[in-house]
């Protein structure tokens, strides 16, 4: 059971974040839950991040600093900081994020209130590239259901809604449960991971803003390069995502009826997203045709 003595680990993956890391480290160490460790995974930074992190670790024994000798990739660095952690509970934090001082303690209270939960999420503020701050309130109890397919279907629904509604990747986990979930480097891996979490067990949610994240939209082609994936992955993002989810469903401990319900939910998501892509392409073609017609008239 979560108590004031429970060790909580926070994992901070970073690469070339010397200008950002200090603030997020201070927000983690400023938690009112004292039994805390901060595991920093430095992915072979070249900008001074190493010196800064070593200085910070020398000042506070709660910091565990690990430097990868080579860049292992974004996902491997995320997984790596969890493997290095020793807490019964774990959460990730981005290198430009901020946590409210009571983020961890409020999350532990939610775990104590419902021992079934494997994850507790909170509302987050999102800061865009133009410094606009937004948040969206999440309401609903489907993710706390005993039925894994109800949770799974709700998560699929949320994936087609605003990303600001709920972000399981930046909640507090029962480490023993989440550490056993396989992850693979791919586009929308965070969404696939979210569906795996939904199948793993019930979630709790705190309808309070207890953290802040920076958010910017990146082109698919840029993300493919960032993740070091083959370029053709950009053309089959939804297909690859749904295939990975279906593979995971085949491995889960579900009854035949539950598995069919879950597979049907994936099929509905695939069709919906394909329709969205088709509509977007049609608008793009219509726009290009309009430009061409305008140029002809001008001639």
Image (cartoon, grey):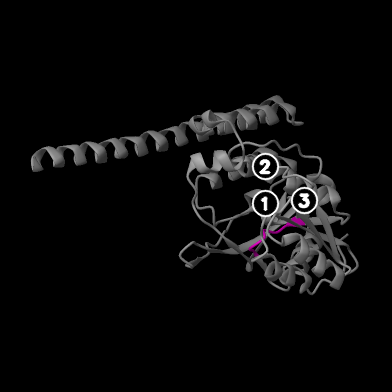
Q: Please give the label number shown on residue 72.
A: none
Q: What residue did someone put label 3 on? A: 118
- What whole-number distance in Å separates the C-alpha atoms at marks 2 and 3? 14 Å
Residue found at x 60% / y 55% = 166
Q: Nearer the N terminus, badge 2 or badge 1?
A: 1
Q: Earlier in the sequence, mark 2 or mark 3?
A: 3
Say if residue 201 shows up in the picture: no
**Predominant secondary structure in magenta?**
loop
Q: Residue furthest right?
A: 5
Label 3's element?
A: loop
Asked if the residue at tag 1 contacts the one at tag 2, i.e. Cβ–Cβ closer than 8 Å, the answer is yes
Q: Which residue is mark 1?
A: 169
Residues at discs 3 and 1 in contact (Cβ within 8 Å): no
The range drawn in magenta is 91-97
Q: Quadrant of the N terminus?
A: bottom right
Can residue 165 be seen from the camera position used here?
yes
Q: Identify the residue at image location x=75%, y=36%.
A: 182
* Number of residues whose C-alpha sits closer than 10 Å to that of mark 2, classed few (under 14), some (14–19) or many (20 or more): many
Label 2 sits on a secondary structure element that is: helix
Q: Secondary structure at mark 1?
A: helix
């Amino acid at each position: 059971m979560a108590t004031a003595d429970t060790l909580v680990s926070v994992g901070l993956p970073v690469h070339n974040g010397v200008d950002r890391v200090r603030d997020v480290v201070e927000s983690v160490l400023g938690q009112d839950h004292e039994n805390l460790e901060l595991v920093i995974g430095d992915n072979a930074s070249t900008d001074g991040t190493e010196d800064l992190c070593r200085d910070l670790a020398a000042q506070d024994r709660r910091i565990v600093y690990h430097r990868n000798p080579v860049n292992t990739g974004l996902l491997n660095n995320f997984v790596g900081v969890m493997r290095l952690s020793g807490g019964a509970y774990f959460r990730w934090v981005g290198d430009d994020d901020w946590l409210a001082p009571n983020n961890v303690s409020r999350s532990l209270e939610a775990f104590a209130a419902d021992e079934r939960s494997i994850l507790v999420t909170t509302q987050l503020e999102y800061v865009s590239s133009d410094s606009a701050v937004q948040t969206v309130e999440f309401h609903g109890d489907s993710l706390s259901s005993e039925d894994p397919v109800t949770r799974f279907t709700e998560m699929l629904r949320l994936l087609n809604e605003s990303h600001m509604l709920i972000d399981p990747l930046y909640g507090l986990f029962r480490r023993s449960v989440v550490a056993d979930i396989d992850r693979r480097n791919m586009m929308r891996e965070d969404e696939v991971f979210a569906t795996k979490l939904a199948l793993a067990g019930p979630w709790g949610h705190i309808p309070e803003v207890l953290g802040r994240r920076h958010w910017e939209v990146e082109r698919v082609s840029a993300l493919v390069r960032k993740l070091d994936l083959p370029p053709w992955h950009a053309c089959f993002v939804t297909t690859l995502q749904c295939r990975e989810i279906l593979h995971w469903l085949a491995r889960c401990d579900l009854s035949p009826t539950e598995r069919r319900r879950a597979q049907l939910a994936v099929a509905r998501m695939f069709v919906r997203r394909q329709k969205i892509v088709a509509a977007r392409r049609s608008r793009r073609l219509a726009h290009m045709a309009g430009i061409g017609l305008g140029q002809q008239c001008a001639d």
